[in-house]
Image (tube, rainbow, N blue to C red):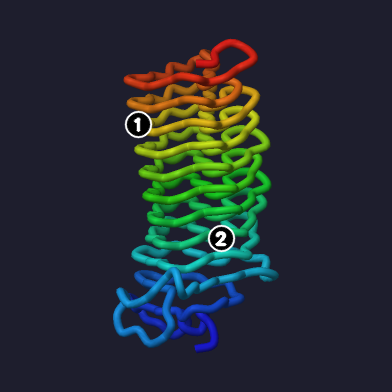
Amino acid sequence: MHSVSDALDICSVSDEIWVARGTYNESIELTENLALYGGFVGSEEALEERDLAQNSTILDASGLSDSVVTVSGVEGTVLDGVTITGGSFETGGGIRFSYASSATVSNCTITGNSALQGGGGVSSRLSAPYLTNCSIIANESTRRGGGLSISDSQATMTNCLMSENRAEEGAGVWIGTSTPAITSCTVRNNVASKNGGGIACEFAHPLIYNCDILNNTGQYGGGIAFLVSEGEISETTIAYNVTPGGGGVYGDESSPRFERCSVFRNREGGIYFIFRQSKPIFKDCLIEENESLYSGAG
């Protein structure tokens, strides 16, 4: 086979495709119940024999003006051990989930992608993707979700890194009208020109557990910004974030619940809520050493 697309064209439902190391300049669309694995030399006889660290499989859509990977209206799909780069599209420059799709994305690096509206790295709309052990780094969106944009979806993220992404809102992750579960993830060094350097929530209810939200920058809510949202955040560290308003956490008309969280060393306030219909709850949380030129440093 000369391309990944060639292999996809002849595969059957429930097939596995093993992709050898190398760079493939193409965009692909995954099909129902298909498993695509990267990281092979070509002599392996079992999946466990591949070495992802030594054998990079790179899907690069540079110059194609398309998402690198599209997952549309299918279930049971697996994408594992691939670097996704060079994508550029309206939404989901790296990976675009749409139309009630569900897929598992594991051990992937998603970097150097861009989008105009949302999800420079990954966009999920009306879908339920599961991302685990993935690095989503240095992606951009003109509007929302430099790393990820989650809209009307029930996404799950476990052991993922969102770093050095840029967007107007939600540079690391933007969540709209969704209830994602984000567990044991690190969101760091992301930059938003408006709300939510790390994470921005609008009409959303995220479940965030055992995460580190560090050193992000935004106009409001360097770490997390809640706009007309709720949510449950537990055993999570929010630290070293910077913004003119609510360095750690910012909220407007929002009532998230924080339990056993640490909010410290954020600049321009650890926590800032506009108490117009906002009723945040903080239980057994450590809030200290936050800095502000004004009141409410925490």
Type of residue at label 2?
Gly
Q: Quadrant of residue 15?
A: bottom left
The numbered mark, 2 or 1, whose residue comes first in the sequence reads 2
Please give the name of the residue rendered at 37% of the width and 44% of the height, measured from the top-left corner.
184
Measure the alpha-carbon separation of dots 2 and 1: 30 Å
Name the residue tied to disc 1.
Answer: 234
The answer to which image quadrant residue 243 occupies is: top right
Badge 2 crowding class, 10 Å Cα cut-off, few under 14, some 14 to 19, many 20 or more, is many
Say whether residue 36 is visible.
no
x, y percent for residue 27:
57, 71
**Pick the front one: 152 or 207:** 207
Question: What residue is at 40 percent from the left and 79 percent from the top?
Answer: 18
- Height in image: 143 above or below 267? below
Residue 104 lies in quadrant? bottom left
The picture places residue 16, in percent across and down from the top left corner, at 35, 77
Task: Give SS at disc 1.
Answer: strand
Residue 4 in the image, given as x and y percentages of width and height: 50, 79
Could you tell me how many numbered marks the image carries? 2
Q: In the image, is residue 235 above or below residue 126? A: above
- Between 166 and 207, the one lying in front of the other is 166
Which one is nearer the viewer's eye here, 42 or 80?
Answer: 42
Of badges 2 and 1, nearer the viewer stands 1
Question: Which residue is depicted at the point 44% across and 40% down?
Answer: 178
Residue that carries the numbered disc 2 in the rendered image:
94
- Numbered disc 2: secondary structure: loop
